[in-house]
Amino acid sequence: MDRIQLKTDAKDAMRTANPHPVLVALIYTVIVAAVQMIISTFSGFSSMLTSIFGGDSADIFVLGMLLPTLLTSIVASFVVAFLELGFVGYTLRVINRQPAGISDLFAYARLFLKAWGLSFMIGLFVGLWSLLFWIPGIIAAYRYSQAYYILAENPDKGIMDCIRESKSMMIGHKMDKFILDLSFIPWYLLTIVTCGIASIYVTPYTSVTNAAFYNMLRYGRSSQAYGQNQGYGQNWQQGGYQQGYDPNWQQNGYNQNGWQQGYDPNAQQNGYNQNGWQQGYDPNAQQGGYNQNGWQQQNNGADGNQNG
């Protein structure tokens, strides 16, 4: 797999995206950090009360605070889960040169339970494999790394279906993904040196590149830019291939294979055969000395009968 091509395509997609992925990634990071801060604040508040008051009264008070703290943590985890899925969907739209914006972060809010469940199951499997040793855990993490992208493109799929499909897609490609991740080490070092400032660019850059990696596994190319999905986050066809720039392609001069029949939307009415090949320069090709396959019968169509 050509890592340089993946990164080049990601950079090109980021340059053409509006708003710029740096802005969207910054907003995403701020929201996730704020949610996590709320969880930490509630947890710390309970511990602080216990240390200040002590005794049975404090225990009763802390127990009273436990329920709202637990509910807040659960709600916050749901929010983080669908935001992560939304950011994955956003990066797919960026790499595919589709309209993408800040609102895409919240596009999967209705799937918060499924997003949370996918995150939980991946964490559970990786954790169980890690009990054997840390290397099986790392392998498991790479094995399930494409599950979020699968769910983002196919919201109707089940959690285990996404995990199984990711496992199948990554057969023979885990080392490719590992080497791709290693190639970002200089960028991570730059983030450390700049005290996290460089992460404003590194986060969207690595994320869009990972989306290009998914496209390469799924479709054999890093970008679906030369087509258009009819629905957000859904494969309109079982094969997952896109028809073309015009969603009304069958009505505008494209055949069943998605190839344009001619420059004229009314191709079949203007000298094109059923395969989309032009029959002749003359729109009235069959009348101007061309046969049904578009080949000229003779140099002078007017004298065809005389010379033939």
Image: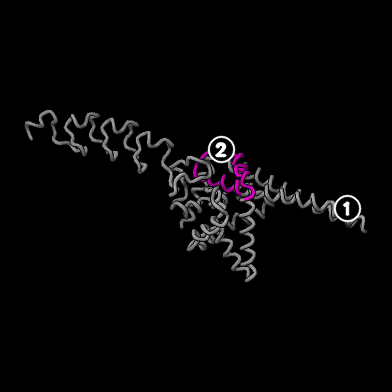
Q: Check disc 2 and report its element: helix, strand or loop.
A: loop
Total residue callouts: 2
Residue furthest out toward the left = 306
Q: Check disc 1 and report its element: helix, strand or loop.
A: helix
Question: Badge 2 local density, few (<14 within 10 Å), some, or many (20+)?
Answer: some
Residue 89 part of the magenta-drawn span: yes
Q: What stretch is highlighted in magenta?
A: 85-113
Question: Badge 1 local density, few (<14 within 10 Å), some, or many (20+)?
Answer: some
**Drawn side of residue 288 relative to residue 214, left or right:** left
**Drawn side of residue 212 relative to residue 296, left or right:** right
Residue plotted at (14% across, 30% down): 301
x, y percentage for residue 26?
65, 44
Instruction: Determine which of the numbered discs, if any, sits on residue 18 in the image.
Output: 2
Residue plotted at (64% across, 57% down): 120
Q: How far apart are marks 2 and 1 (CA)?
A: 50 Å
* Residue type at the position of mark 2: Asn
Query: From what the image shows, is residue 129 above or below residue 108?
Result: below
Classified by dominant secondary structure, the portion drawn in magenta counts as helix
Residue 115 part of the magenta-drawn span: no
Mark 2 or mark 1, earlier in chain: 2
Instruction: Determine which of the numbered discs, if any, sits on residue 61 in the image.
Output: 1
x, y percentage for residue 37?
75, 49
Locate the C terminus by quadrant: top left
x, y percentage for residue 52?
91, 55
* Residue type at the position of mark 1: Phe
Instruction: Determine which of the numbered discs, if any, sits on residue 211 in the image.
Output: none
